[in-house]
Amino acid sequence: MFLKQAFRVSSPAGKRGRLSILIFHRVLSVPDPLLPDLPDIQRFDQILAWLKDWFNVIPLGDAVARMKLGELPERTAAITFDDGYADNLVNATPVLKKHGLNATFFISTGFLDGGRMWNDTIIEAVRGAESSLINCEFLGLGQLEITTIEQKREALNHLLLAVKHLPSNQREDATRQISECSSSVLPNDLMLSCKQLIELRDAGMDIGAHTVSHPILSSIDDKIAHREISEGADYLRNLLGERIRVFAYPNGKFGRDYSDKHVEMVKALGFDAAVATNWGSSDSTSDLFQLPRFTPWDTARWRYGIRLLMNLRHELHQT
């Protein structure tokens, strides 16, 4: 009861209202010891129960429209997912519908129908590696031991950090080398198919754009960045037969992953709003093309709620 009242005080109805946007990527069928931070169905169900108790959870597009008018309900929140994983439909959507909630799913169109994101290639390569060592000398990481789950987690931390901000062609080459070193059999069903994406939309979920190939926009040529943003949205519009209203910047940290020029591209392409991954909440004075998002990592209800409250009050400190 204390948390609900605190959220009410921090986010009243009307012009002083604030919007909290949560970000997810995947909902697993069962916990994955290699990816312990990803929620499974049971955990996601628990989180949604908390959110439904504490907030008025409404679709992101509706929240943005009402925020512009200064007409947000008290304690407003919206739920978003990035990238376009198949488990968004298979696992997340039934839980959302169970709670009567909506989410917005930002789709990187280049991975539909059997594609795989670079980070998942590395994760699955390490998971299924035939050897106890993986040669990463080309990244300056030497030989990484991957015998135990703990060693695999540590190796992934080093690999993903080393590869994430490489220019796109170098990132592709590094990912390929890691995959070849592991000799793993890699899955081709992690991402949504076009058919599944239509099912997701038909289940009442909203669809947003997230580029074609999920590049770090600040690391690529401006013309390529514009093409990534526009072609991703065009593909979704043609597939779904509807206007795509919102966009999510890949990775999403301002100044590191995207800049003002990318914000201007998104505006010029006719989106209504765009979301980042900078922490914080939004109000009627916020830049609609850089809306912050934040999701706590805590597993205890009270800590999860306090973290959201701190974020809502702009008092969050990374720990």
Image (cartoon, rainbow, N blue to C red):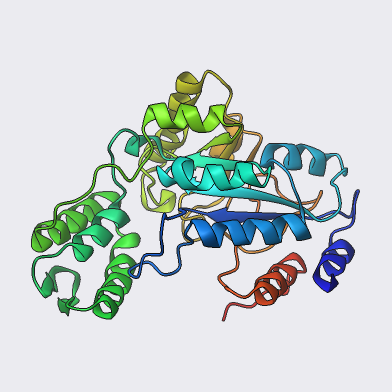
Residue 124 position (above or below residue 212): below
Looking at the picture, how far across and down is residue 259, in whole percent? Answer: 53, 52
Question: In the picture, residue 45 is in which quadrant?
Answer: bottom right
Q: Quadrant of residue 297?
A: bottom right
Residue 106 can be seen in this image:
yes
Residue appearing at x 42%, y 46% in the figure: 87
Would you say 299 lies left or right of 285 here? left
Quadrant that contains the C terminus: bottom right
Residue 155 lies in quadrant: bottom left
Q: Name the residue at 21% across, 65% down.
A: 126
Q: Which residue is drawn at 70% across and 75% down?
A: 302
Q: Is residue 253 visible?
A: no
Q: Which of 116 and 68 is in front in this view?
A: 116
The one nearer the camera, 270 or 300, is: 300
- Give the percent coordinates (x, y) of residue 55: 77, 56
Drawn side of residue 52 relative to residue 168, left or right: right
Q: How many marks?
A: 0
- Which of 319/184 is in front? 184
Coordinates of residue 103 in the picture (x, y in percent): 61, 43
Residue displayed at 51% across by 41% down: 106
Q: Is residue 121 left or right of residue 82?
A: left
Say if 167 sits above or below 137 in the image. Answer: above
Q: Quadrant of the N terminus?
A: bottom right
246 is higher (above) or lower (below) than 6: above
Q: In this view, does 172 lie to the left or right of 208?
A: left
